Image: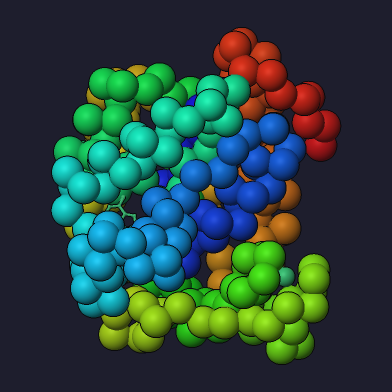
Amino acid sequence: MNIVLFGGPGAGKDSIAKFLAEDFGLVHVSSGDIFRKHIAEQTEIGKSVKAYIDQGNLVPDELTIAIVMDRLAQDDCANGFILDGFPRTVAQASAFLKQKPIDAIVHISVDEETVVARLSGRYKCTTCHEPHNKLWHKGIECSKCGGPLSQRDDDREEIVRKRFNDYKETETAMLDFYKSLLVKVLPVESKLVDPPKSMYSRFLDDHVKSLNYIAATSKAKSKDVKK
Ligand code: ADP
Ligand code: ZN
Protein backbone atom coordinates (compact mmCIF):
# COMPACT_ATOMS: atom_id res chain seq x y z
CA MET A 1 0.00 0.00 0.00
CA ASN A 2 1.07 3.57 -0.62
CA ILE A 3 0.58 6.09 2.18
CA VAL A 4 1.22 9.85 2.28
CA LEU A 5 1.95 11.63 5.56
CA PHE A 6 0.75 15.19 5.74
CA GLY A 7 1.30 17.58 8.64
CA GLY A 8 3.20 20.67 9.76
CA PRO A 9 6.91 20.80 10.49
CA GLY A 10 7.58 19.00 13.76
CA ALA A 11 4.22 17.23 13.75
CA GLY A 12 5.98 13.89 14.12
CA LYS A 13 5.83 12.70 10.50
CA ASP A 14 9.29 11.18 10.70
CA SER A 15 8.49 9.05 13.76
CA ILE A 16 5.07 7.88 12.55
CA ALA A 17 6.65 7.04 9.19
CA LYS A 18 9.26 4.83 10.82
CA PHE A 19 6.65 2.91 12.88
CA LEU A 20 4.36 2.46 9.86
CA ALA A 21 7.25 1.40 7.65
CA GLU A 22 8.23 -1.27 10.15
CA ASP A 23 4.73 -2.55 10.95
CA PHE A 24 3.45 -2.63 7.39
CA GLY A 25 6.64 -3.42 5.48
CA LEU A 26 6.74 -0.11 3.62
CA VAL A 27 9.72 1.86 2.34
CA HIS A 28 10.05 5.26 4.06
CA VAL A 29 10.73 8.03 1.54
CA SER A 30 11.35 11.51 3.00
CA SER A 31 11.80 14.45 0.62
CA GLY A 32 13.64 16.42 3.31
CA ASP A 33 16.07 13.53 3.91
CA ILE A 34 16.73 13.19 0.17
CA PHE A 35 17.53 16.93 -0.04
CA ARG A 36 19.75 16.87 3.08
CA LYS A 37 21.67 13.90 1.68
CA HIS A 38 22.34 15.83 -1.54
CA ILE A 39 23.52 18.82 0.52
CA ALA A 40 25.81 16.66 2.67
CA GLU A 41 27.30 15.05 -0.45
CA GLN A 42 27.60 18.45 -2.16
CA THR A 43 25.94 17.26 -5.37
CA GLU A 44 24.65 19.69 -8.03
CA ILE A 45 21.12 19.18 -6.67
CA GLY A 46 22.41 19.82 -3.16
CA LYS A 47 23.96 23.11 -4.25
CA SER A 48 20.74 24.28 -5.89
CA VAL A 49 18.44 23.43 -2.93
CA LYS A 50 20.60 24.50 0.02
CA ALA A 51 19.61 28.17 0.10
CA TYR A 52 15.89 27.38 0.00
CA ILE A 53 16.14 24.90 2.84
CA ASP A 54 18.38 27.05 5.07
CA GLN A 55 15.87 29.90 4.87
CA GLY A 56 12.84 27.68 5.43
CA ASN A 57 11.54 28.20 1.88
CA LEU A 58 10.09 25.41 -0.21
CA VAL A 59 12.24 23.98 -2.98
CA PRO A 60 10.57 24.77 -6.37
CA ASP A 61 7.87 22.28 -7.38
CA GLU A 62 9.42 21.14 -10.63
CA LEU A 63 12.73 20.13 -9.04
CA THR A 64 11.05 18.55 -6.02
CA ILE A 65 8.65 16.48 -8.15
CA ALA A 66 11.48 15.23 -10.39
CA ILE A 67 13.65 14.18 -7.43
CA VAL A 68 10.90 12.41 -5.49
CA MET A 69 9.40 10.65 -8.53
CA ASP A 70 12.88 9.42 -9.39
CA ARG A 71 13.21 7.87 -5.92
CA LEU A 72 9.73 6.28 -6.11
CA ALA A 73 10.63 4.68 -9.45
CA GLN A 74 13.28 2.52 -7.76
CA ASP A 75 12.48 -1.18 -7.31
CA ASP A 76 12.22 -1.17 -3.52
CA CYS A 77 9.18 1.14 -3.66
CA ALA A 78 7.14 -1.29 -5.76
CA ASN A 79 5.75 -3.13 -2.71
CA GLY A 80 4.50 0.01 -1.03
CA PHE A 81 5.90 3.22 0.39
CA ILE A 82 5.22 5.82 2.99
CA LEU A 83 5.90 9.33 1.76
CA ASP A 84 6.97 11.90 4.31
CA GLY A 85 7.18 15.61 3.39
CA PHE A 86 5.82 15.22 -0.14
CA PRO A 87 3.51 16.34 -1.72
CA ARG A 88 3.49 19.71 0.03
CA THR A 89 1.69 21.85 -2.55
CA VAL A 90 -1.40 21.25 -4.69
CA ALA A 91 0.83 21.36 -7.80
CA GLN A 92 3.01 18.59 -6.35
CA ALA A 93 -0.01 16.54 -5.29
CA SER A 94 -1.63 16.81 -8.66
CA ALA A 95 1.53 15.85 -10.59
CA PHE A 96 2.19 12.99 -8.18
CA LEU A 97 -1.32 11.48 -8.24
CA LYS A 98 -1.25 11.36 -12.02
CA GLN A 99 1.69 8.95 -11.76
CA LYS A 100 1.15 6.92 -8.58
CA PRO A 101 -1.92 5.47 -6.88
CA ILE A 102 -2.21 6.20 -3.17
CA ASP A 103 -4.35 4.40 -0.61
CA ALA A 104 -4.60 6.91 2.23
CA ILE A 105 -3.36 10.18 3.68
CA VAL A 106 -2.32 10.34 7.32
CA HIS A 107 -3.05 13.90 8.45
CA ILE A 108 -1.23 14.94 11.61
CA SER A 109 -2.62 18.14 13.11
CA VAL A 110 -0.46 20.22 15.41
CA ASP A 111 -0.47 23.80 16.75
CA GLU A 112 2.25 26.41 16.37
CA GLU A 113 3.45 26.56 20.01
CA THR A 114 3.76 22.78 20.14
CA VAL A 115 5.89 22.85 17.00
CA VAL A 116 8.16 25.62 18.30
CA ALA A 117 8.65 23.91 21.66
CA ARG A 118 9.25 20.56 20.07
CA LEU A 119 11.61 21.53 17.25
CA SER A 120 13.94 23.46 19.50
CA GLY A 121 14.48 20.09 21.24
CA ARG A 122 14.72 17.97 18.11
CA TYR A 123 17.92 16.04 17.47
CA LYS A 124 18.87 13.18 15.22
CA CYS A 125 21.53 10.51 15.55
CA THR A 126 24.31 11.27 13.08
CA THR A 127 25.09 7.54 12.83
CA CYS A 128 21.75 5.67 12.53
CA HIS A 129 19.43 8.70 11.99
CA GLU A 130 17.10 7.72 14.85
CA PRO A 131 15.03 10.82 15.82
CA HIS A 132 15.19 12.05 19.45
CA ASN A 133 13.71 14.93 21.43
CA LYS A 134 15.12 16.58 24.54
CA LEU A 135 11.51 16.86 25.79
CA TRP A 136 11.59 13.16 26.60
CA HIS A 137 15.14 11.98 25.92
CA LYS A 138 17.56 13.40 28.47
CA GLY A 139 20.80 11.82 27.24
CA ILE A 140 23.27 13.36 24.78
CA GLU A 141 23.81 10.08 22.95
CA CYS A 142 21.58 8.04 20.65
CA SER A 143 19.32 5.65 22.59
CA LYS A 144 19.65 3.08 19.83
CA CYS A 145 23.33 2.99 18.89
CA GLY A 146 25.09 5.43 21.25
CA GLY A 147 26.08 7.72 18.36
CA PRO A 148 26.27 11.53 18.67
CA LEU A 149 23.06 13.60 18.29
CA SER A 150 22.87 16.70 16.08
CA GLN A 151 20.35 19.48 15.44
CA ARG A 152 19.14 20.80 12.05
CA ASP A 153 20.15 24.30 10.91
CA ASP A 154 16.53 25.15 10.00
CA ASP A 155 15.17 24.30 13.46
CA ARG A 156 15.80 27.85 14.77
CA GLU A 157 12.65 29.48 16.16
CA GLU A 158 12.08 32.18 13.50
CA ILE A 159 12.60 29.69 10.68
CA VAL A 160 10.32 27.18 12.40
CA ARG A 161 7.53 29.79 12.69
CA LYS A 162 7.92 30.65 9.02
CA ARG A 163 7.80 26.98 7.97
CA PHE A 164 4.73 26.46 10.14
CA ASN A 165 2.85 29.48 8.74
CA ASP A 166 3.68 28.47 5.17
CA TYR A 167 2.32 25.01 5.94
CA LYS A 168 -0.89 26.45 7.42
CA GLU A 169 -1.49 28.49 4.27
CA THR A 170 -1.71 25.37 2.12
CA GLU A 171 -3.21 22.89 4.62
CA THR A 172 -6.90 23.43 3.78
CA ALA A 173 -6.30 23.50 0.02
CA MET A 174 -4.35 20.24 0.23
CA LEU A 175 -7.03 18.47 2.30
CA ASP A 176 -9.77 19.74 -0.03
CA PHE A 177 -7.79 18.45 -2.99
CA TYR A 178 -7.50 14.94 -1.51
CA LYS A 179 -11.17 14.95 -0.51
CA SER A 180 -12.18 15.95 -4.03
CA LEU A 181 -10.41 12.81 -5.27
CA LEU A 182 -12.04 10.69 -2.53
CA VAL A 183 -8.67 9.75 -1.05
CA LYS A 184 -9.15 8.40 2.48
CA VAL A 185 -7.81 10.78 5.15
CA LEU A 186 -6.78 9.27 8.52
CA PRO A 187 -6.45 12.06 11.11
CA VAL A 188 -4.35 12.09 14.26
CA GLU A 189 -3.55 14.93 16.65
CA SER A 190 0.00 15.63 17.76
CA LYS A 191 0.25 16.89 21.35
CA LEU A 192 3.16 18.63 23.05
CA VAL A 193 3.81 16.04 25.73
CA ASP A 194 3.44 13.17 23.35
CA PRO A 195 6.37 10.83 22.84
CA PRO A 196 6.23 9.41 19.29
CA LYS A 197 5.22 5.94 20.48
CA SER A 198 2.12 7.24 22.29
CA MET A 199 0.97 9.26 19.28
CA TYR A 200 1.43 6.18 17.10
CA SER A 201 -0.49 4.09 19.60
CA ARG A 202 -3.45 6.55 19.54
CA PHE A 203 -3.23 6.54 15.76
CA LEU A 204 -3.48 2.73 15.67
CA ASP A 205 -6.39 2.77 18.15
CA ASP A 206 -8.36 4.86 15.68
CA HIS A 207 -7.16 3.50 12.36
CA VAL A 208 -5.61 0.03 12.57
CA LYS A 209 -8.75 -1.57 11.10
CA SER A 210 -8.73 0.76 8.10
CA LEU A 211 -5.00 0.22 7.60
CA ASN A 212 -5.26 -3.56 7.75
CA TYR A 213 -8.15 -3.42 5.32
CA ILE A 214 -6.22 -1.18 2.93
CA ALA A 215 -3.14 -3.40 3.24
CA ALA A 216 -5.16 -6.56 2.59
CA THR A 217 -6.88 -5.12 -0.45
CA SER A 218 -3.82 -3.44 -1.95
CA LYS A 219 -1.44 -5.61 -3.94
CA ALA A 220 1.47 -4.91 -1.65
CA LYS A 221 2.54 -7.56 0.83
CA SER A 222 2.20 -6.52 4.43
CA LYS A 223 1.65 -8.20 7.76
CA ASP A 224 -1.53 -7.97 9.83
CA VAL A 225 -0.81 -5.52 12.64
CA LYS A 226 -2.68 -6.33 15.84
CA LYS A 227 -3.44 -3.73 18.45
P1 ADP B 1 9.76 19.63 8.10
O1 ADP B 1 8.54 18.81 7.76
O2 ADP B 1 10.19 19.47 9.50
O3 ADP B 1 9.68 21.05 7.63
P2 ADP B 1 11.36 18.32 5.99
O4 ADP B 1 12.54 17.50 6.30
O5 ADP B 1 10.16 17.63 5.43
O6 ADP B 1 11.02 19.08 7.33
O7 ADP B 1 11.76 19.49 4.98
C1 ADP B 1 12.84 20.33 5.21
C2 ADP B 1 12.94 21.36 4.12
O8 ADP B 1 13.15 20.70 2.86
C3 ADP B 1 11.70 22.20 3.92
O9 ADP B 1 11.66 23.32 4.77
C4 ADP B 1 11.83 22.58 2.43
O10 ADP B 1 12.79 23.61 2.28
C5 ADP B 1 12.42 21.33 1.80
N1 ADP B 1 11.37 20.40 1.34
C6 ADP B 1 11.11 19.16 1.82
N2 ADP B 1 10.08 18.59 1.17
C7 ADP B 1 9.66 19.50 0.26
C8 ADP B 1 8.62 19.54 -0.71
N3 ADP B 1 7.78 18.50 -0.88
N4 ADP B 1 8.51 20.65 -1.49
C9 ADP B 1 9.35 21.69 -1.36
N5 ADP B 1 10.33 21.74 -0.44
C10 ADP B 1 10.50 20.66 0.35
ZN1 ZN C 1 21.95 6.05 16.54
- 112 relative to 216, above or below: below
The residue lying toward the viewer, choosing from 44 and 138, is 44
Percent across and percent down for residue 150 are 57, 82
The residue lying toward the viewer, choosing from 171 and 81, is 81
- 117 relative to 22, above or below: below
Residue drawn at x 36%, y 78% as measured from the top left:
154
Percent across and percent down for residue 167 are 28, 59
Q: Quadrant of ligand 1?
A: bottom left
Res 32 → quadrant: bottom left
Residue drawn at x 37%, y 72% as measured from the top left:
112
Res 136 visible: yes
Res 160 → quadrant: bottom left
The residue lying toward the viewer, choosing from 76 and 133, is 76
Q: How is the image coloured?
A: rainbow
Q: Is residue 188 left or right of residue 161?
A: right
Residue drawn at x 61%, y 57% as measured from the top left:
15
Image quarter hosting the N terminus: top right
Res 81 → quadrant: top right
Res 190 visible: no
